[in-house]
Image (tube, helix red, strand yellow):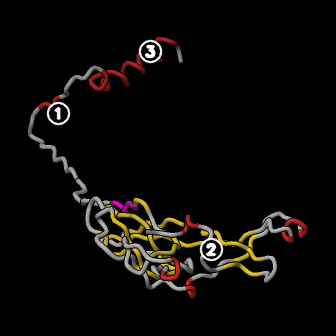
Amino acid sequence: MRNDQIFVLLLVVLLPLSGCFDDAVGDAEGTGDESTIINNYYNNTTISENSLPVIVGGFSLTTTCPNVGTDCGYNEMVWPVLGGSSMVVDYDGDVVSFGIDFDMDYVIDLEMPGNYSQYETRVNFQMNESFLNPIHHTGVLDQTLIDAGWSSCHQWVNIIAIDDDNGTTIIPLRWNFEWDRESQTCVVGPDPSDYRNIFY
């Protein structure tokens, strides 16, 4: 085939397609007899996200007078109690439960009293030593340092707040206890010399 024959063949093929290249409208498209239907599908599902409760403050194992806010003698002090100043805010609803989980099963074992949306002092007198189960923690210490009293005990607990949409906030805490070298046990009890643990 010669070059001029190839040129003519290309013209025969490309001329009918020329309307596609320069935005020209062909006869079949320009009549307006056809209608185009455009279907728009929209997802109108509303997704509402629950804001989880926000815990402000907290509480800890402490000692207090039987009537919170009053003075009492040391022999009248109650130990153990849960006490502290706290509040829980739920920006899109209400807090229905606020308390502490002692056995790390993510279920509240002791509920804290009061209006959760108010920052106030809360004390739970239902606390007792049966909730406490500290373990001896030696870490990387050798036996000489352990015998010298360089070890301690601890217990992990969770502070939990649950809102009306079942949204849950969990804050894990580590409570520390003393290790008694003589009895080789964790000391679960108030230390009369440690007034930092006394809650008024």
- Picture coordinates of residue 193, whole percent (x, y): 62, 69
Numbered circle sitting on residue 197: none
Q: Which residue is mark 1?
A: 29
- Picture coordinates of residue 42, whole percent (x, y): 23, 53
- Check whether the beta carbons of the residues at disc 1 and disc 3 lie within 8 A of each other: no
Left of 164 or right of it: where is 161? right
Q: In the image, what residue type sits under mark 1?
A: Glu
Residue at the farthest top position: 4
Q: Which residue is mark 3?
A: 7
Which residue is at the front of the view, 37 or 167?
167
Camera-side mark, 1 or 3? 1
- Tag 1 or tag 2, which sits nearer the N-term? 1
Which residue is at the front of the view, 145 or 39?
145
Q: In the image, what residue type sits under mark 2?
A: Asp
- Picture coordinates of residue 121, whole percent (x, y): 37, 67
Range of magenta residues: 50-55
Q: Quadrant of the C terminus?
A: bottom left
Camera-side mark, 3 or 2? 2
- Tag 3 or tag 1, which sits nearer the N-term? 3
Query: To which quarter of the image does residue 24 belong?
Result: top left
Crowd tier of the residue under label 1, counting other residues whose Cα lies within 10 Å: few below 14, some 14–19, many 20 or above: few
- Picture coordinates of residue 3, whole percent (x, y): 51, 12
Numbered circle sitting on residue 191: 2
> What is the distance, in whole Å, between disc 1 and disc 3 at their CAs?
29 Å
Q: Secondary structure at mark 3?
A: helix
Crowd tier of the residue under label 3, counting other residues whose Cα lies within 10 Å: few below 14, some 14–19, many 20 or above: few
> What is the distance, in whole Å, between disc 3 and disc 2 at their CAs?
105 Å
144 to 12, vertically: above or below: below
Q: Secondary structure at mark 1?
A: helix
